[in-house]
Every structure is written in C-alpha cells, then in structure tokens.
Image (spheres, grey):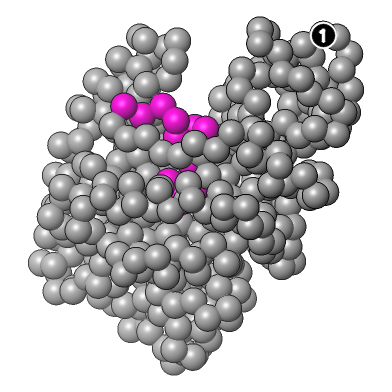
Amino acid sequence: MPTYTTYRQILQDQPFPYACLDLALLRQNITINRSRAGDKKIRLASKSIRCVEVLRLLLAADAQFQGIMAYHGEEALALAQAGFDDLLLGYPVVDPALLRQLGQAVQAGTYLCLMADEVRHLELANAAGAALGVRMPVCLDIDLSQSYPGLHFGVWRSGIRTLPDLERILEYLNTLPYVRLDGLMGYEAQLAGVGDDTPGQYLKNAAIRWLQKRARRPISTWRAAAVAAIEAHGFQLRFVNGGGTGSLETTRQEAVVTEVTVGSGFYAPHLFDHYRHFQLHPALFYGVPVVRQPRAGIFTCHGGGFVASGGIGPAKAPVVYLPPGGQLDPHEGAGEVQTPVFYKHPVPALQPGDPIFFRHAKAGELCEHFNHLLLLDGETVHSVPTYRGQGWSFG
C-alpha cells in the first residue's frame, strides 16, 4: 500500500485542496469486483463515479463491464451526447419535458431505458413516446425490502411489493403502445449497502448478519417469481439487474439475474471498509493542508468538511487516512473552513503546508466538491475533469 510519504512527494506541486484517484488501487478493485461478480455482466453506477474519463477507463478495462446506470435523466442525456450507450435510468423521471428529450435520444439511436414502478411513470413514458412516435424502453423496479415490527430492513424505493402489484402493472403495460418492457430491477440495499463488521459494534453486527441471512431467500424467491410472471404475460426481458457492491457474492447466485451494478466498489469509500466477505482498497482520497498547530498533537487543516448524504450520524463524516492514526474532534468534526485532526503517539512531524489525506464516506459525492480528479499512476499525475468540472450538475 502507498505511504503518506509517497503521496506527499508525488503531490507536492499540486495546489490544495485536491481529490486523487490511485489507479493502481483502482485496478485492484476492478479485479476484486470482477471476481466477486462471477459470470454476471457488471453495470456501472455513475452516481458513484461522476467522472467521464473514469467511466471510459472502467468500460475499457474488461468486456464484463457493460452499460451505465445513470441517476438523473439530464445526466443520461449528457452521457449519451458524450458517446455512451446502454444507459439505464436508476430512478423514475416524471418531468414531461425531460422525458421528451430522453425520447428524442431513443429516437436518435441511443439505448436508454426508463425506470418505473407505478402506473403514473408508465403513463408519462407512453405520452412522451406517443408524441415522438417511438417506443420507450422501460425497466420495472420491484421492492426487495423486508418489514418487521418496528423495523424496515431495506430502502423505501418501489411500490411493487407483491405479485398482485406486479400483475396490475403488467396488465396496464399491455395497453400502452409506446412503452416496451425491457428490464426488471430489484435493489437489495440491506445486503448491498449495509456493512456487517463495524468495529466496536459487536451486537449490531450480529443482528445485521442475522437479518441479512434471513433476507436472502425471500429476495431470490421474489425476484424469480417476478421474472416468471413477466414471461407468463408474454414479455421478453433484455436484462434483469440486481445487487450492488456489498451483495455481489449472493446476487450472482440467482439464475434469473443477468447483470449486477457496481459503483462504490471502484473508489472504495470508507463505508465499504466493514464487510466480512470482501476487502477493497482505498483508491479515492482527498488532501487538505495543515495551516495551524494549536496544541501539541493537534493539526488544524484548512477546509475538509465533505460530509456524505443519508441518515445523519458520525459514519457520514470523512475519516483521516494518512498519516495514519488521526482522529476528528467529536464536537468540531470536519468543518467548512477548518478541520482539526488529533494525533496521539506517535505524533507525525507535520508542518504548515503539509497535507493530511482524508477518505469520504461515499464515493461519487466527493466529486461534487472538486472540478478535477488527479489520477495517480506510479509517479505520474494526470488531471481529468469531474462532472462538476465539466459544468454538469444534476442535483
């Protein structure tokens, strides 16, 4: 693994702050995730990458990587204009004007598939297709969460929770001349995005493992039943998408699944450090400068407060990466204009102007704070624009 000294030397001429992607570690993560996915095709989750050049690099890395799951309709249009194809919208689009633009992209030859889980989504897609005289590909998203007394295990995503729910949607689909059912998706967030080996949380880890083990069979049974119902209605699916970085080992075992989605598994943010069944390498990190030393063992950096979305809590804060051993102040945390870092023995010999490197809790969100990523390849540093650096902002 690279050391603090190595990174500091390579980056000594770069202006602060900067975000870095270590290509050697990225390549190792590519290999790990290819192996974990078995023979399933891997679709890239663009929200966790947010850099066109990295998307290109990943798609060129191996034939197993095919297609992109976009997180916004405008993003899908931008990616299509940048030359990407096989674009699956991970979330429904309900803006009629945007749907018309997406329909125009389909009309022009881009494969672009909309996401739907209720009648209104299909009505809007059909109206957009009718206005252009084009059939709009759609993917149905089924709910894979489980509910227990006092606990919802999974995410509040789709309204298609049962076979009768799905049957009603399929019957309605048969009445729509400008919509074509191409795909089925189910996201098992409670397996793919919940770590089971968090330090200091023995009881919580044990509960998560029990719940995850209990969830696997209902997930695979429901997904297989959904595919069977779709086929019984005469539809031929182009793809069945499942999984995420944390669930590849189980999702790949489902015969009906044709592809899995990976995003965070390439950059490896710190929320993906705590899984028993796989270990990734911290490819993405950022550096901010030490500007003060208010006490012995305390180094205050300028900026650095890049906190992740989702449920609010300490896990969404960045973590100190290098030099190792640093901790954030539990009260001040990582701040907008300053971030104090506390070191106990051994205290590194840091001076004002030296970097401290941090890791974000999530993957692509870090790119919203930087115009460029510095790609590190050995001692070579190459700057490429992020979405933000290209002027892309999709909310």
In magenta stretch: residue 272:
yes
Please state which of residues 340 and 43 is positioned toward the viewer in this rendering.
340
Percent of width and height locating residue 67: 39, 69
Instruction: Look at mark 1 in the image and give the residue it sits on.
Output: 296
Residue 53, magenta (yes or no):
no
> What amino acid is found at the position of numbered circle 1 in the picture?
Ala
Residue 101 at x, y = what percent? 58, 80
- In this view, the residue in front, 145 or 319, is 319
> Is 356 on the left-hand or right-hand side of 6?
right
Q: Residues within 10 Å of mark 1 (few under 14, many from 20)?
A: few
Give above or below for 277 relative to 75: above
Residue 206, percent from left and from top: 30, 15
The residue drawn where x is 20% and y is 27% is 214
Closer to the camera, 80 or 1? 1
Give the structural element (helix, strand or loop) at label 1. Answer: loop
| Magenta stretch, residue numbers | 263-276
Q: On the picture, is 361 further left or further right than 214?
A: right
Left or right: where does residue 193 sit relative to residue 4? left
